[in-house]
Image (tube, grey):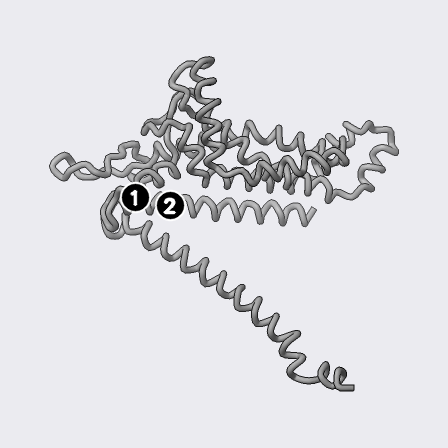
């Protein structure tokens, strides 16, 4: 009787309904406020280059002259970031070209060719790759890949190719996992209907399963590209960090994340050099937003189909 009375009381309602509701609401609002504060902080710092130091966004984006410590008597600081943008785009796209066929093939094997082996062996292996710290990837690249490229392709070994290979291994778990989930979500009715009209298993995978799962696979590819753009430490260890536009895949270069991590601790707050680094951070943030918008567009396209 007392138990029933307690269940109907306001205290029971407060403990089992309102407390949980207000707790998760608090953390949800906190996350929104934190995101707004983070974006506002980076935008304020990043825009100082253009509003306080009066540099042109065109010069910032399209000039290849990076001399942020140049004296006023020699023309003043120059903060062209085209070399870093080209470095980030080229190393990320090359990593994507290497990693996407490997990742999608593994996803097909896990879901369509050997689901039991995929679940028991490949899925745990992919999770291991996800948990390896970036510095380990960089160290393996430095110890194995760089000497290998130097011996077989020439140059110093520190190169666009080394950075792309390291990145391709780092982003493959993301693309493979999302692609496998997308393939698993396809109705088995499609598979059985295709086999019933005489198609082979591979024809069914190639003509039916992959096109149906394409929005999900593309989402995985975009997520992998977003991670490749934001990766800093491992790429920095094998890319060479030479401030020049690469003319071949064995040339060394530098990307935006590397120059930010190398120079941020050596500059004073409020200087042209420091503001330019914040502007590059803002540019990376804008790129991340564009990737998120693209993922949402692909997701909506998949739902509408």
Which residue is drawn at the image coordinates 70% and 36% (left, top)? 211
Q: Is residue 68 above or below residue 10?
A: above
Q: Residue at x 65, y 42 (%)?
A: 216
Where residue 13 sits, quadrant-wise, is: bottom right
**Compared with residue 290, is residue 240 higher up or lower down, i.e. above or below?**
above
Find residue 185 and report its horizontal and vertical position in percent. Answer: 73, 44
Residue 39 pos. (x, y %): 41, 55
Name the residue: 60% across, 71% down: 21
Query: Which residue is tagged 1?
Result: 265
Determine crowd level at label 1: few under 14, some 14-19, many 20+ residues with C-alpha closer than 10 A.
few
- Please rate how many residues cluster around mark 2, counting C-alpha atoms within 10 Å: few if below 14, some from 14 to 19, many from 20: many
Q: In the drawing, does residue 279 fall left or right of residue 206? A: left
Mark carried by residue 281: 2
Name the residue rendered at 76%, 83% in the picture. 4
Q: Which of the 4 image quarters holds residue 186? A: top right
Q: Secondary structure at mark 1?
A: helix
């Amino acid at each position: 009787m007392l138990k029933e009375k307690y269940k109907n009381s306001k205290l029971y309602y407060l403990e089992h309904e309102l407390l949980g509701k207000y707790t998760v609401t608090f953390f949800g609002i906190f996350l929104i406020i934190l995101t707004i504060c983070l974006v506002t902080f980076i935008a304020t710092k990043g825009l100082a280059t253009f509003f306080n130091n009066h540099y042109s966004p065109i010069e910032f984006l399209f000039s290849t002259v990076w001399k942020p410590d140049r004296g006023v008597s020699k023309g003043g600081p120059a903060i062209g970031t085209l070399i870093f943008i080209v470095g980030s785009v080229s190393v990320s796209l090359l990593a994507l070209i290497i990693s996407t066929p490997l990742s999608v093939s593994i996803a097909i094997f896990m879901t369509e060719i050997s689901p039991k082996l995929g679940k028991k062996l490949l899925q745990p292996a992919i999770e291991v790759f996800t948990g390896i710290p970036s510095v380990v990837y960089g160290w393996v690249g430095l110890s194995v890949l760089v000497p290998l490229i130097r011996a077989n392709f020439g140059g110093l070994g520190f190169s666009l190719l080394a950075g792309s290979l390291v990145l391709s291994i780092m982003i493959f778990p993301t693309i493979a996992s999302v692609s496998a989930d997308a393939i698993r979500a396809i109705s088995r009715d499609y598979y059985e209907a295709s086999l019933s009209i005489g198609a082979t298993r591979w024809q069914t995978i190639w003509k039916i399963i992959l096109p149906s799962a394409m929005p999900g696979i593309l989402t995985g590819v975009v997520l992998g590209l977003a991670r490749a753009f934001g990766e800093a430490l491992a790429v920095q260890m094998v890319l060479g960090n030479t401030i020049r536009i690469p003319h071949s895949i064995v040339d060394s270069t530098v990307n935006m994340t590397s120059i930010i991590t190398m120079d941020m601790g050596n500059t004073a707050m409020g200087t042209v050099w420091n503001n330019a680094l914040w502007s590059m951070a803002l540019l990376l943030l804008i790129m991340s937003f564009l990737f998120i918008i693209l993922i949402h567009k692909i997701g909506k396209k998949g739902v509408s189909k």
